[in-house]
Image: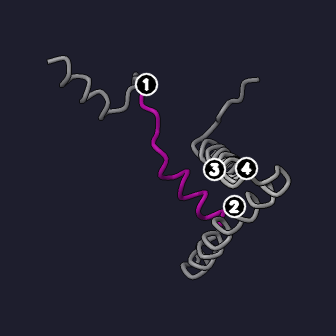
Amino acid sequence: MSTRVSSAADAAKFARALDEVCQSLAYQIAAQVFFGAPADRAVGAAIVLHAISFVPVTLLGIYFMAREGLTLAGARKMAEDNAPKPSQGSTSVMPRQAESASSVNR
């Protein structure tokens, strides 16, 4: 199955979702392997640990966004306005990687 990323915002959403899944899975495996917990309790521990690490940061982010008068739509617009525009004839190598590659070839 192939998925296509249409924008930087979509890529960021996908990366966050993948990170959340991996983090929950890591918590579950750690609870099972290191503590010998049964699978159902490990899943419960993974959910609780994930909530503990996710909820406070999210609430603080919402608070500071509201304090600054920033909305989700405004943040999305800022991200789209500041996203790098693809240039004509650009290569897939990032500038720093190209610099490093050229210095290695000397």
Q: Position of residue 57 (x, y in %)?
A: 60, 70
Q: Residue extending furthest bottom?
A: 67
**91 or 63, nearer to the observer:** 63
Query: Position of 77 compared to 38: left or right?
Result: left
Residue at the image point whose x is 51% and y is 52% from the top = 81
Could you give the CA–CA distance between mark 3 and mark 4, rounded to whole angstroms? 24 Å
Residue type, numbered disc 4: Gln
Q: Quadrant of residue 46?
A: bottom right
Amino acid type at mark 1:
Ser
The residue beneath circle 3 is 16
**Dominant SS in magenta:** helix
Is residue 73 positioned above or below 20 on the image? Answer: below
Q: Nearer the viewer, mark 2 or mark 3?
A: 2
Residue placed most toward the observer, 9 or 35: 35
**Looking at the image, is mark 1 or mark 4 nearer the viewer?**
4
Query: Depth-wise, is mark 2 or mark 4 nearer the camera?
Result: 4
| Residue wearing tag 1 | 92
Mark with earlier residue (2, 4): 4
Residue type (three-letter) at the residue carrying disc 3 = Arg
The part of the chain drawn in magenta is 72-88
CA gap between label 3 and label 1 equals 23 Å
Q: In this rendered view, identify the residue nearer to me: 32 or 18.
A: 32
Residue under circle 2?
Answer: 50
